[in-house]
Image: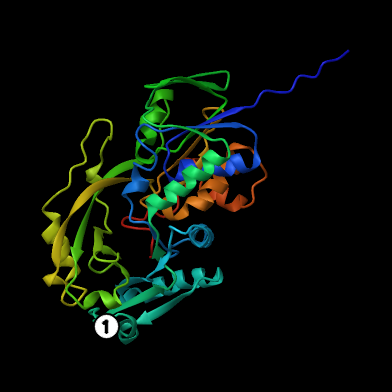
Amino acid sequence: MNIIKKAAKQRIIIIGAGSTGLATALEIAKVDDSEVIILEKNYVGSGQTGQCCGFVRTFYNSKEMIFSAHESMKQIQKICAMEPNLKYVKKGLLVIDYLKNKDAIKNNIKLMQQEGINVRYLEELEINEIYPNIKINGICAGFDEDAGYVNPQIVINYLERECKKLGVKIFEKTKVVDIKTKNGQFNIKTTNGNFKADKLFNATAGYTNNINKMMNFNLPIKTIKINNTFYRLPLGLNKCLIAIADFVNHFYVIPHKDFIDVSSIVLDLKQEVDLEKDKVIFNQDVIDCYLEIVSKRIKGSEKSATLGGFSSHIDISPDYYPILSKIDEIPNYYCAAGFSGTGFKHFPMIGKLMKEIILDEKYTYPELVSFFRYNRFKKKQLRKNISDSYFINK
């Protein structure tokens, strides 16, 4: 008599319990009976996801990023419709540039309109029709009308809850300290015991290469310190406040209910940090500096009350586009990194793409898998390096 033994479940371990790790775990658990485990060095959502402003937009400079952002926005809005504690607050986003650069703005808008996105081109007086307090001399803008924000912590709570419903195990306060590979499997040493995995997914964002170096591997990404400042605008201004990405004065402002969140569009690559060694400390000098910059665009904002700020970090790739990929040099190893501050708004698509890559399924969007592959940096002809942002393709 032949006895057929049922194959043991494969174990998939994900390092990092932010939006990327949780979304991927959830997508895998929906369709596969693998044992899915998430290891988190701190607490669920305590990293970059917990620090982000939760803004959701579709204004990008490539069709791939635009498509991913649009599909993700629709999924985020669906989640908000199902969750009583979640609300999608539509604000709109003005992407402002010099009038001489209007062709670049128009090209971006054309790409977005081809995906059915609600976006339009504006010049000076048209800008003031939707935002009277904008100083308009010599500028044009793209208006991403459906851009808005959600509370990232409530989203994280939703993802965590849905993962646990499907049997995903989440270990908090479990820092990975060493990884050994043997025969395509992984022996993972942590501060909370040892784990074995058949497949391993690194979803640690700014810590990505700290994990990679345990396996003598490195991705071409940098972790950069950034500063965010908060202000309460003078009474009356907030009734017409929308988000602004200003490529003339180089600031990015996200409106919330009672305050605005301001950061610089220009990333200072000299501010590279190793999160295992360096403290990311807020620079108090930027409080007055950022407000002075914002006042060049928003009338009356120089009278704002300052509310402090904080310092965080983002991980960037050479072309500012994410890496979502299987790693050929290490069998059964996968990475998602280099989001350049944009990972949260793409988490539904990231989860879907990484699920298909990890489970070796037929790709729903093969052109996206190819676009985000890490080996694009090995080619002689790289995509144009974007020195300041991925909003506008100049």
Q: Is residue 230 above or below residue 112?
A: above
User: Which residue in the structure is indicated by mark 1?
Assistant: 132
**Residue 20: percent from left, percent from top:** 46, 44
Residue at image location 40% in from the left, 37% down from the top = 204
**205 displayed left or right of 309:** right
**Residue 132: percent from left, percent from top:** 27, 83
- Identify which residue, 177 or 384, lies in the foreground: 177
Residue at the far top in the pictured view: 1
**131 displayed left or right of 44:** left
Classed neighbour count for the residue bearing mark 1: other residues with Cα under 10 Å, few (<14), some (14–19), many (≥20): some
**96 displayed left or right of 330:** left
Q: Quadrant of the C terminus?
A: bottom left
Residue at the far front in the pictured view: 84
Residue type at numbered disc 1:
Pro
Residue at image location 57% in from the left, 35% down from the top = 167
Residue at image location 36% in from the left, 50% down from the top = 340
**Residue 130: percent from left, percent from top:** 34, 81
Kindly tell me whether residue 354 is visible in this rendering.
yes
Question: Callout 1: helix, strand or loop?
Answer: loop
Q: Quadrant of residue 275?
A: top left
**Residue 151: percent from left, percent from top:** 38, 56
Residue at image location 58% in from the left, 18% down from the top = 183
Q: Is residue 27 above or below residue 176?
A: below
Q: Quadrant of residue 116?
A: bottom right
